[in-house]
Image (cartoon, rainbow, N blue to C red):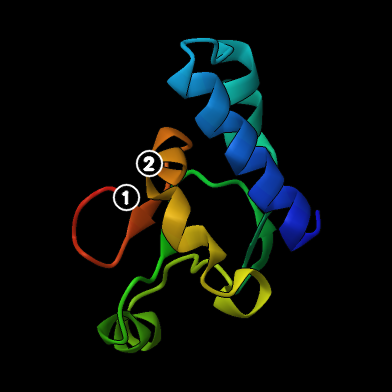
C-alpha cells in the first residue's frame, strides 16, 4: 500500500471515529492486515512502533522492534497518533501512541 493510501485510510478512521461510525470489523481487519510500511517490510500495525523523537533512533539499534518507516510516511503520521493507537501501534515515548 502506498504512503498516501495509508494516510487516506487513517483519515477515514479518524472521520468514522469522530462521527461514531467506526466499524469494529473494519478495524479488526486493518489490525490484522499487512499494510503499514516498517523497517521489516509491510507489517500489521499491532505492536509496530512509530518513533516520534530522535532518541527513538537509538532505541531502534538496541531493541528488536518493528519500526514504522519514516522515509515512506515522512512526518505525515505524526498527525494520526490516535488512529495508530486504535490500530494497536506504539511510540518511543513509552506510552501507547
For residue 73, above or below residue 95: below
Label 1 Cα crowd, 10 Å radius (few <14 / some 14-19 / many 20+): many
Viewer-side residue, 26 vs 81: 81
Marks 2 and 1, the one that precedes in the sequence: 2
What residue appears at the point 43 percent right and 67 percent down from the top-left corner? 65
Q: Is residue 88 left or right of residue 26?
A: left
What residue appears at the point 39 percent right and 50 percent down from the top-left corner? 81
Residue situated furthest left in the rendering: 94
Q: Secondary structure at mark 2?
A: helix
**Answer yes or no: do the residues labelled 2 and 1 have beta carbons within 8 Å?**
yes
Label 2 Cα crowd, 10 Å radius (few <14 / some 14-19 / many 20+): some
For residue 22, above or below residue 85: above
Image disc number at residue 82:
2
What residue appears at the point 45 percent right and 45 percent down from the top-left corner? 84
- Percent coordinates x, y for residue 18 in the rendering: 45, 22
Front tag of 2 and 1: 2
Residue under numbered circle 1: 97
Q: Secondary structure at mark 1?
A: loop
Q: Is residue 34 visible?
A: no
Amino acid at each position: 500500500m502506498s504512503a498516501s493510501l495509508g494516510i487516506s485510510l487513517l483519515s477515514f478512521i479518524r472521520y468514522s471515529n469522530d462521527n461514531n461510525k467506526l466499524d469494529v470489523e473494519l478495524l479488526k481487519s486493518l489490525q490484522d492486515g499487512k499494510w503499514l510500511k516498517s523497517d521489516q517490510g509491510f507489517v500489521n500495525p499491532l505492536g509496530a512502533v512509530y518513533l516520534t523523537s530522535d532518541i527513538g533512533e537509538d532505541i531502534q539499534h538496541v531493541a528488536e522492534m518493528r519500526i514504522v518507516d519514516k522515509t515512506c510516511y515522512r512526518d505525515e503520521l505524526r498527525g494520526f497518533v490516535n488512529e495508530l493507537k486504535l490500530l494497536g501501534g506504539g511510540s518511543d515515548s513509552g506510552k501507547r501512541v
